[in-house]
């Protein structure tokens, strides 16, 4: 056909079309293949054992609710990093603690606390560095919680190891970030919280006590210095308290005064509080005379009035650190006022719902207060002291409070709640309520032939394994408050050989002191527990 396309031309057009189609397909494919993907350095790299570990945790048999919550919290921890650090290496040790905690069967509270604390620690670093290595040391302290397990789950006794209350530093190294900014090495301090110092055991320590009862004459009443009596066995001086899951900071006078620099510590309570006060003065000074220590009792009205055998308390100040230690006698721990001030033989209103006037007046000047009461709560003492129970400013008419036990419990709760209400006004103040010191009268009371002749240490046992206090009234009073329990009851219960017994200087035939302690002795341990919690 003239003027039409030739066969050869059509063939060329077809070939060109096919080539163009091939090129177009190749171009589209290349676009698809070259499309951007998530960079490798933005991928969260988890240990391949992560899934296995969580599955094992779910199978530990410690409660499905615990395990699900633990795994969910772990997922939240890991998801925190998806928009922050380019690479996060979570090692196998990261989850070993939670796995072990789930297997302890100690309740969900510990597991939740552990996981939450880990989440807080890890979230600190979400915007800090391109690489974060969470090492085994990060959780070492938590691995020894409660029943102590090795990696294989075997029980491990750590009571002889120095663990728990000591601070542990874990360095988390961070290299230079991709943005050119230099990241500093981060150091986090991990400290065990909630240590139960009252749970542990007595151990024999041949090292001498911090002071001698023969030498501490400036501070120690001779009636409590058993080395001044005819007692010949002093094995009770060699026993030291060792908490089960944590370590008490070693007490020295220098460390105590440094910790209490420019501060005032007050013991307010009965004669057992006075023993703790005298014990602390001897411990601080090593039992040596300190002429430079100032008697500042007059600043607190603690002066001996005319006709009285002694003042209502004592106060001493260490001038180098301006540390003041004082004691005020308040056997009932409530306010006492004369019902008829003009009558020398008047009865006294025992205000169960009011703190001692001394405490309410001087509280703004105190930094640490240790309260106690207990052994004066009996009908004989109330009658001898002419104390009459008052509530709301009037004689008590509440039958529940009228019993001795009810009145004591009501008073403890009232005073602890009052102190707790003052803590916000005085943020620096730390308050302790010391649980009751046990009596060890056998076969009678103090005035009916009761004795405590045992001189063999730990004949009743050496360990306290219970978690709860042996003074339920004290424990209930501080529960839910910021007042801390100085729990000494159970550990002191094991020390019946440590009382003054029949060896008092002014011994009365047939009368033994199975209430107060030989010093040095058990009250020294109370002060070590106090020092550890300051």
Image: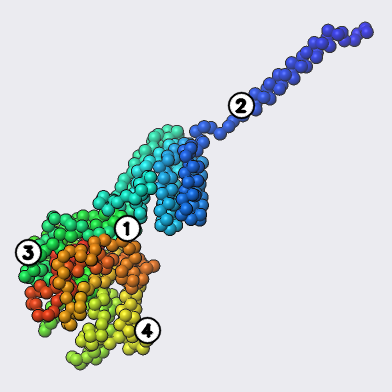
In the rendered structure, find residue 34 and report the number of the disc placed on it.
2
Whether 152 is drawn above or below 317: the answer is above
Tell me the mark number nearer the camera, choosing from 3 and 4: 4
Is residue 36 rendered to the left or right of residue 517? right
Q: Which residue is mark 1?
A: 195
Q: Looking at the image, which residue sits at the far right?
A: 1
Alpha carbon distance from label 3 to label 1? 35 Å
Q: Dot 4 lies on which element?
A: helix
Q: Quadrant of residue 240?
A: bottom left
Whether 511 is drawn above or below 37: the answer is below
**Image location of residue 415, percent across then percent down:** 32, 75
Is residue 505 rendered to the left or right of residue 3? left
Q: Which residue is mark 3?
A: 215
Is residue 493 in view?
yes
Question: In the rendered structure, which disc, 3 or 4, sits on the residue that comes first in sequence?
Answer: 3
Residue drawn at x 18%, y 91% as measured from the top left = 344
Q: Which residue is mark 4?
A: 400
Residue drawn at x 13%, y 62% as measured from the top left = 235
Is residue 353 in view?
no
């Amino acid at each position: 056909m003239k003027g039409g396309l030739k066969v050869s031309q059509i063939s060329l057009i077809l070939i060109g079309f096919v080539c163009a189609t091939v090129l177009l397909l190749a171009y589209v494919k290349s676009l698809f293949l070259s499309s951007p993907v998530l960079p490798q350095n933005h991928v969260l790299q988890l240990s391949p054992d992560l899934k296995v570990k969580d599955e094992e945790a779910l199978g530990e048999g410690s409660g499905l609710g615990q395990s699900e919550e633990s795994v969910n919290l772990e997922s939240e921890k890991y998801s925190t990093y998806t928009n922050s650090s380019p690479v996060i290496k979570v090692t196998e040790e990261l989850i070993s603690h939670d796995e072990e905690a789930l297997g302890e069967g100690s309740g969900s509270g510990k597991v939740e606390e552990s996981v939450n604390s880990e989440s807080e620690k890890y979230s600190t670093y979400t915007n800090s560095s391109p690489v974060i290595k969470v090492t085994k040391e990060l959780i070492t302290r938590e691995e020894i919680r409660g029943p102590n397990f090795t990696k294989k789950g075997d029980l491990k006794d750590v009571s002889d190891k120095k663990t728990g209350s000591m601070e542990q530093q874990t360095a988390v190294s961070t290299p230079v970030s991709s943005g050119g900014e230099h990241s500093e090495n981060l150091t986090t301090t991990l400290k065990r919280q909630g240590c139960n110092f009252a749970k542990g055991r007595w151990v024999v320590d041949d090292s001498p006590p911090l002071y001698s009862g023969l030498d501490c004459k400036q501070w120690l009443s001779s009636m409590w210095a058993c080395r001044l009596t005819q007692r010949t066995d002093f094995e009770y001086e060699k026993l030291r308290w060792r908490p089960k899951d944590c370590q008490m900071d070693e007490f020295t006078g220098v460390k105590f005064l440094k910790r209490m620099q420019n501060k005032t510590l007050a013991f307010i309570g009965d004669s057992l509080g006075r023993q703790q006060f005298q014990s602390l003065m001897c411990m601080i000074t090593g039992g040596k005379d300190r002429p430079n220590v100032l008697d500042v009792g007059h600043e607190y009205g603690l002066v001996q009035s005319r006709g009285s055998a002694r003042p209502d308390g004592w106060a001493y100040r260490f001038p180098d650190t301006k540390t003041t230690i004082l004691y005020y006698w308040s056997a009932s721990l409530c306010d006492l006022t004369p019902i008829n001030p003009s009558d020398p033989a008047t009865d006294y209103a025992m205000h169960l719902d009011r703190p001692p006037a001394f405490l309410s007046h001087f509280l703004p000047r105190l930094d640490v207060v240790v309260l106690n009461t207990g052994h004066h709560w009996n009908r004989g003492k109330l009658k001898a002291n002419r104390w009459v129970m008052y509530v709301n400013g009037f004689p008590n008419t509440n039958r529940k409070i009228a019993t001795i036990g009810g009145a004591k419990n009501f008073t403890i709760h009232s005073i602890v709640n009052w102190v707790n209400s003052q803590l916000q006004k005085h943020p620096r103040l730390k308050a302790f309520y010391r649980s009751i010191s046990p009596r060890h009268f056998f076969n009678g009371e103090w005035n009916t032939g009761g004795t405590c002749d045992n001189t063999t240490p730990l004949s009743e046992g050496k360990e306290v394994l219970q978690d709860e206090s042996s003074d339920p009234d004290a424990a209930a009073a501080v529960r839910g408050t910021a007042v801390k329990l100085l729990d000494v009851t159970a550990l002191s219960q094991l020390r019946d050989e440590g009382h003054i017994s029949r060896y008092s200087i002014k011994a009365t035939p047939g009368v033994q002191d199975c209430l107060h302690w030989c010093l040095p002795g058990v009250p020294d341990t109370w002060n070590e527990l106090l020092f550890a919690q300051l």
